[in-house]
Image: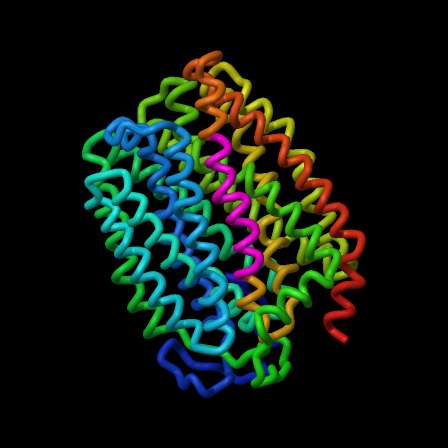
């Protein structure tokens, strides 16, 4: 995925490496195998978001079957998942900083896929909420160890690109959920979707467990990590001591409110406001979210790798700039009267508003020390997901119920417009982060 002549030159001194079945104690890792691991982790993240996002496709049918409000559905797609996802992420990340990250990811994948299947067995709203909590706990074992693995496999000048490829799993997984869910919504009961989309993850867990090797800590920097792990408190104090990291968390949280609000309520938006049938919504959203989101993260990662190599401030300056440019497209997408025009504005908005994601992950990893990386990823995901994945969908649900007496089915349009203001706040904090980033990175490397 990131193969090049420069890659080959960098790796020539490390040996040819071995394939998936190679000796775990051999630190020699080939370019091809490094990219293979990235492909496997990307696929895990795709499955992660298929299992997470499928619920958004069936918000209205589930709401009708269990006779609940938009606020309750906002809790289900938001805090019921995010709260346990984020709290479970901290101890799992601590485990990943000490143990075998590959095995932790495989176990988590099996758990969350099984709980996705269990979601289809729910016969009450409470049972469904419990199953979604189980999905959240399982998925907590995904990204923190994956970020740590990718940071050990890919050097600094390629890390944002690699993390951008990994992060695009959000959009590919969401696209599959939208497309597959749209088809299933028109032809089957909503429970069938959870069975069909949850089962593949149970099988792929074996691929992760038996083909991914655990690299030495600090391999990509050719550094030797201390055998002594840091405590959670030490990691948190270290990160809070970096002003750029604090501003990064504020900016990412505001962008996450907007991102998860649109991701979870975009499907009902096009159904309620534009009256589109489920499959048509699925096709359009699969194209916009799958292609647009992937372009944004991959392009954003590549750009900040190039610009940031000369001036690290660009890792945050560029996302700030692109987010500001994205916002007029976002307002136009929500206010447009025709569905075609709305999707036409939605695409550039989604590309630009997601370009910050690889920079967020990369700076978080670069500011952490070697034995802090999985924990640092979990802390970042804790903050961003509690605010974004938890509060974002809930805020939209509450606003829907508040606005409905005045706006009817169009209430969701004004709910999403309200949370769009968070994007501008996110861009402001990214700019503040860029001003102290270079100094913080120098201090970490000393």
Asked if the stretch drawn in magenta spans residue 389, the answer is yes
- Choose top left, top right, bottom left or bottom right for residue 5: bottom right
Q: Is residue 243 left or right of residue 299?
A: right
Q: Is residue 425 left or right of residue 51?
A: right
- Choose top left, top right, bottom left or bottom right for residue 358: bottom right
Above or below — where is 74 with respect to 275? below
Q: Position of residue 267 (x, y in %)?
A: 40, 30
Q: Is residue 90 left or right of residue 124?
A: right
Q: Is residue 5 visible?
A: no
- Residue that protrudes farthest toward the top in the picture: 406
In which quadrant is the C terminus drawn? Answer: bottom right
Report how many numbered discs are placed on residues in the image. Answer: 0
- Choose top left, top right, bottom left or bottom right for residue 231: bottom right
Q: Is residue 4 visible?
A: yes
Q: Position of residue 367 (x, y in %)?
A: 67, 65
- Front-most of 394 and 182? 394
Q: Position of residue 321 (x, y in %)?
A: 72, 40
Q: Position of residue 191 (x, y in %)?
A: 21, 40
Q: Residue at x 55, y 39 (%)?
A: 257
Q: Which span of residues is magenta-colored?
A: 378-396
Above or below — where is 329 with respect to 369? above
SS majority, magenta: helix
- Front-most of 100 and 250? 250
């Amino acid at each position: 995925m990131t193969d090049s002549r420069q890659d080959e030159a960098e790796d020539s001194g490390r040996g040819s490496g071995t394939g998936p079945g190679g000796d775990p104690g051999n630190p020699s890792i080939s370019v091809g195998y490094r990219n293979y691991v990235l492909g496997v982790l990307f696929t895990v993240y795709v499955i992660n978001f298929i299992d997470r996002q499928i619920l958004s496709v069936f918000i209205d049918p589930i709401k009708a079957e269990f006779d609940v409000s938009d606020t309750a559905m906002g809790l289900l797609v938001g805090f019921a998942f995010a709260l346990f996802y984020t709290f479970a992420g901290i101890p799992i990340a601590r485990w990943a900083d000490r143990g075998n990250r590959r095995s932790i990811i495989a176990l988590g994948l099996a758990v969350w896929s099984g709980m996705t299947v269990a979601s289809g067995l729910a016969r009450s709203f409470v049972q469904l909420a419990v199953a979604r909590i189980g999905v959240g706990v399982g998925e907590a074992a995904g990204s923190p160890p994956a970020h740590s693995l990718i940071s050990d496999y890919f050097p600094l000048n390629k890390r944002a690109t690699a993390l951008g490829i990994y992060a695009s799993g959000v959009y590919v997984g969401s696209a599959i959920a939208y497309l597959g869910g749209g088809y299933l919504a028109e032809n089957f009961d909503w429970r069938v979707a959870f069975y069909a989309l949850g089962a593949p993850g149970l099988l792929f867990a074996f691929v992760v467990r038996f083909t991914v090797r655990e690299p030495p800590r600090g391999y990509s920097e050719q550094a030797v990590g201390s055998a002594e792990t840091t405590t959670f408190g030490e990691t948190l104090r270290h990160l809070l001591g970096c002003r750029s990291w604090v501003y990064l968390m504020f900016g990412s949280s505001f962008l996450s409110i907007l991102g998860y609000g649109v991701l979870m309520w975009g499907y009902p938006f096009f159904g309620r406001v534009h009256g589109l049938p489920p499959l048509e919504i699925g096709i359009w959203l699969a194209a916009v979210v799958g292609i647009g989101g992937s372009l944004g993260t991959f392009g954003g990662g590549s750009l900040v790798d190039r610009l940031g190599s000369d001036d690290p401030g660009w890792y945050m300056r560029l996302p700030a700039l692109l987010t500001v440019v994205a916002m007029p497209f976002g307002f136009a997408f929500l206010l447009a009267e025709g569905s075609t025009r709305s999707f036409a504005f939605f695409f550039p908005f989604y590309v630009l508003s997601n370009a910050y994601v690889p920079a967020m992950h990369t700076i978080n990893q670069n500011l952490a020390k070697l034995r802090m990386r999985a924990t640092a990823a979990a802390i970042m995901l804790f903050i961003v997901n509690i605010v974004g994945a938890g509060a974002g969908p809930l805020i939209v649900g509450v606003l829907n119920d508040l606005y409905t007496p005045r706006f009817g089915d169009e209430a969701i349009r004004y709910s999403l417009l309200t949370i769009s203001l968070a994007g501008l706040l996110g861009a402001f904090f990214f700019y503040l982060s860029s001003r102290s980033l270079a100094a913080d990175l120098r201090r970490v490397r000393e």
